[in-house]
Image (spheres, rainbow, N blue to C red):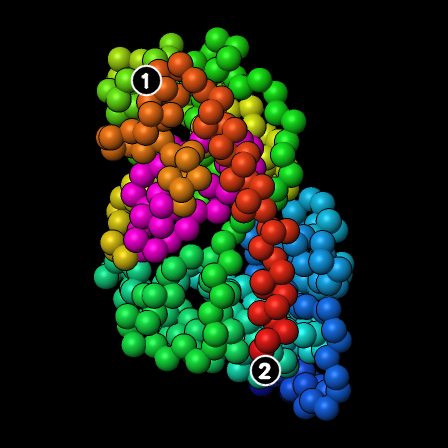
Amino acid sequence: MGASLHLLHTLLKVPRWAMRQPRERWLVHRAVTRIRAARGEPVVRGLVVLVTESVGSRICKVGYGLKSLGWRVVLVHRNNLPANAGRCFDEMRRYATPAEALWLAAHFRPVAYHVFANWNFNAAALLIRHQPGKMVFDDYDVLVGTLAEDFSRAYHREIRLERFCLENADGLCCRDLETQCARKAGYSLRGRRLLLLDCCWGGQVESPAPLASRGHGLHIVNCGNIPLATRAEYLVHQQELGALAATLTAQGLAAESIRFHAYPTSSVWRGASRNETGERLAGGAVPAFFHLHDPVPPDELPRVLSQYDAGLYHVGIGANPPTYNRWKFAYTSGNRVFDYLDAGLPVVIHGCKFMEFLVRRAHVDIGIEAPQSVAAHQFLRRENTEALRRNAFLASSRLAITQHIPKLAAFYESL
């Protein structure tokens, strides 16, 4: 009796991850058996399986674009779905562990598996290792060669798994130029690469009159991953926005006030204020305020953002302590910029060479550093605010996911 109680006590002290190991091995075994049995079966034309931990804007746009071509899109995901997910995916199956992701994915014979990862490569590496079909790897943030030295050491395991995925996938779907860092690091990228920007939804929204036209100052919006998780981050963010307000004023901004609006997708410090009048930011000749809002579903962002005057993409805000090195900001992309274009907003931008090139080419750039374009100067002086908005809508149409998704479908079929 005493020995049995001791055994029970020992079992209860076993970590939860260890208790899951037998089920994980069993699921992998069943999945591999199924994969081997299906090797000779023909693939289902026009079928793709998207596998991801988090269902963000990029995945939704890819699913929406493929559905517009008549493809059947199956989503295997871990975290919660956004609202209106049925608009982007035909079938959705949820997994709890990487082995379950492999097991669920193995039930299909698609033209390709498109596997997305963002700092967590467990499920992606497992699928690429067991190859249930042609594997396309989509690395949202490439870690190798972009992280500051301290971060690089801390994420050694993730970088190792990322390397396996990058080197062993049949194809790489890239949202920006960051895989150049993998090449610089000596990685052998055997799969073909396709550059597919995050793109726009492309449907011009019926926007209300911008808030600035109603006599409430200049309203600048920021959405996405904004570092506000702690009190310290929250206060630093406000200080950085105050400094940005001073910079814009020094460049000739003519407005009775500047109001920054944030729609974060990441966690927010519990003590953060959400009052309608906003929090006053310190310093500056022009009064500046900060407004915090709840997140909105990806496909609803254009409508919500369209009430503002400009979008913000400034890689120096929230970058202390530094996470990335200079190569990150040479090659990276910003998904939020495409949301701004969908909403008809020019972009207050700084620090990202690739995105600066893109918005400059679209003629919607309001650079932090002089010289400004004539249109940007007129916008800041409030002499002509419509020219940049028209350019943004034109760019949204040119960069619509439905315009660019055919090359992704052709990429799948070429593997």
Residue at horizontal 31 percent and vertical 60 percent from the top: 146
Q: In which quarter of the image is the N terminus?
A: bottom right
Which of 58 and 358 lies nearest the eye of the viewer? Answer: 358
**The image quarter in which residue 163 lies:** bottom left
Whether residue 350 appears in magenta in the rendering, the answer is yes
Q: Which of marks 2 and 1 is in front?
A: 1
Which circle marks residue 413 in the picture?
Answer: none
Q: Position of residue 143 (x, y in %)?
A: 36, 63
Q: Where is residue 403 in the image (x, y as percent from the top left)?
A: 61, 51
Q: Position of residue 65 (x, y in %)?
A: 65, 54
Q: Is residue 291 left or right of residue 350?
A: right
Which residue is identified by label 1? 253
Write the start and end of the magenta stretch as one range.
328-357
- In the rendered view, tell whether residue 49 sits above or below residue 132: above
- In the rendered view, tell whether residue 83 sits above or below residue 211: below
- In the rendered view, tell whether residue 149 sits above or below residue 227: below
The answer to whether residue 355 of the structure is visible from this angle is yes
Amino acid type indicated by mark 2: Gln
Residue at horizontal 24 percent and vertical 20 percent from the top: 250
Which of 305 and 16 lies nearest the eye of the viewer? Answer: 305
The answer to whether residue 280 of the structure is visible from this angle is no
Whether residue 195 appears in magenta in the rendering, the answer is no
Amino acid type indicated by mark 1: Leu
Q: Which of the two discs, 2 and 1, labels the residue nearer the N terminus? A: 2
Which residue is identified by label 2? 131
Q: Is residue 292 left or right of residue 205?
A: left
Which of 135 and 365 lies nearest the eye of the viewer? Answer: 365
